[in-house]
């Protein structure tokens, strides 16, 4: 990345794809750097993170909701330094360490320079690495909104029993910590190899889903946060009479049940992420208080984004997959 040249941002390297398909469609190219518009900033990207929406969109799985214009630069989570300010920006200064979940549907995180609105950008807490900061926005806000908005869990003095399905994954490992910090009784669900990690993150109990009849004897849950996208009907029997099931990967069944939302007093809620800086700052405050950390599954350089996607596609990543851009 060459910096600023006569007030304009120089060309940059970026990973792009020019048609729907798998990781093999990704190509490293040099393209003109984007310029920030009103209430936007340009970020010199140090790290980005992988989310399933990245490769699902590239594969065309979301083309009816998020059609891609080609060539496209994928990715939504970024961390880096403020490089340039758009008109009207007074919240940030050049050189400030920031992270963001890019709000624009087109993405643009897997590049040396990315554009983000000030409404989705927050300053990185002192002591937090760029890699950790890149791993927090999408997963962290999904977990927070799923528990607080979908599950109606207060962020302080929570007394609910919370079940987190997929507790060692990108969203799940943050959800365990957010619920624990709020005071909830947290039960995490993961495979046996990740039990110790989920316990260390604050789960009061951990269920190995590979065991025989793993949920037998469990008391009803006030909140079930599904971070893997299962069927609501599977988890409704585990809910208390007025419990809430929130799905971070809602299926048509979840939307249908959510529209009815009268199932013996139990509620079904699809979690639809709404990126906003205020929620990112809530998570950052937990980081500052040592109540939240981002677990990193692995690092990949920008030119090996395809391998990072392939790792994500296995569904076995623990925490977040990071792409080192700078």
Image (cartoon, rainbow, N blue to C red):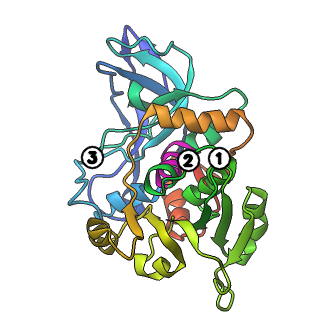
Q: Which segment did they paint magenta?
A: 136-146
Q: Residue at x 64, y 90 (%)?
A: 213
Q: Is residue 62 above or below residue 174?
A: below
Which of labels 3 and 2 is toward the front?
A: 2
Q: Are marks 3 and 1 in contact (CB under 8 Å)?
A: no
Report if residue 326 is visible in the image: no
Residue 154's disc is 2
Residue 121's disc is none
Q: Residue at x 23, y 57 (%)?
A: 65
Residue 71's disc is 3
Q: Point out residue 228 in the picture as x, y percentages from the top left corner.
A: 50, 69
Q: Are marks 1 and 2 in contact (CB under 8 Å)?
A: yes
Residue situated in front as seen by the camera: 44 or 263? 263
Badge 3: how crowded within 10 Å, few (<14), some, or many (20+)?
few
* Magenta stretch holds residue 144: yes
* Magenta stretch holds residue 255: no
Q: Point out residue 97 in the picture as x, y percentages from the top left corner.
A: 58, 24
Q: Mark 1 — residue?
A: 157
């Amino acid at each position: 990345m060459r910096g600023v040249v006569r007030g304009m941002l120089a060309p940059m390297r970026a990973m792009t794809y020019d048609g729907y398909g798998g990781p093999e469609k990704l190509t490293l190219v040099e393209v003109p750097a984007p310029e920030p518009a009103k209430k936007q900033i340009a970020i010199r990207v140090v790290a980005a993170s992988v989310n399933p929406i990245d490769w699902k969109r590239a594969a065309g799985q979301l083309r009816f909701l998020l059609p891609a214009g080609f060539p496209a630069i994928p990715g939504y989570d970024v961390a880096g330094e403020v490089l340039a300010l758009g008109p009207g920006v007074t919240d940030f200064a050049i050189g400030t360490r920031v992270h963001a979940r890019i709000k624009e549907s087109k993405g643009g995180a897997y590049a040396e320079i990315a554009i983000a609105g000030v409404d989705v950008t927050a300053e990185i807490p002192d002591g937090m690495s760029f890699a950790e900061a890149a791993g927090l926005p999408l997963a962290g806000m999904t977990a927070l909104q799923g528990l607080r908005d979908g599950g109606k869990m207060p962020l302080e003095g929570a007394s609910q029993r919370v079940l987190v399905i997929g507790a060692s994954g990108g969203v799940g490992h943050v959800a365990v910590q957010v619920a624990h910090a709020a005071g909830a009784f947290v039960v995490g669900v993961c495979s046996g190899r990740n039990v110790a990690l989920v316990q260390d993150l604050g789960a009061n109990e951990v269920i190995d889903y590979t065991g025989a009849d793993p949920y037998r004897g469990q008391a009803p849950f006030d909140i079930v946060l599904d971070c893997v996208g299962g069927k609501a009907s599977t988890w409704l029997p585990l809910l208390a009479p007025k419990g809430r099931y929130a799905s971070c990967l809602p299926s048509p069944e979840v939307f249908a049940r959510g529209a009815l939302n009268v199932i013996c007093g139990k509620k079904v809620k699809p979690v639809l992420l709404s990126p906003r800086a205020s929620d990112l700052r809530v998570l950052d405050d937990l980081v500052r208080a040592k109540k939240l950390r981002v677990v990193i599954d692995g690092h990949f350089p920008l030119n090996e984004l395809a391998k990072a996607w392939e790792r994500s596609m296995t569904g076995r990543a623990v925490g977040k997959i990071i792409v080192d851009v700078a």
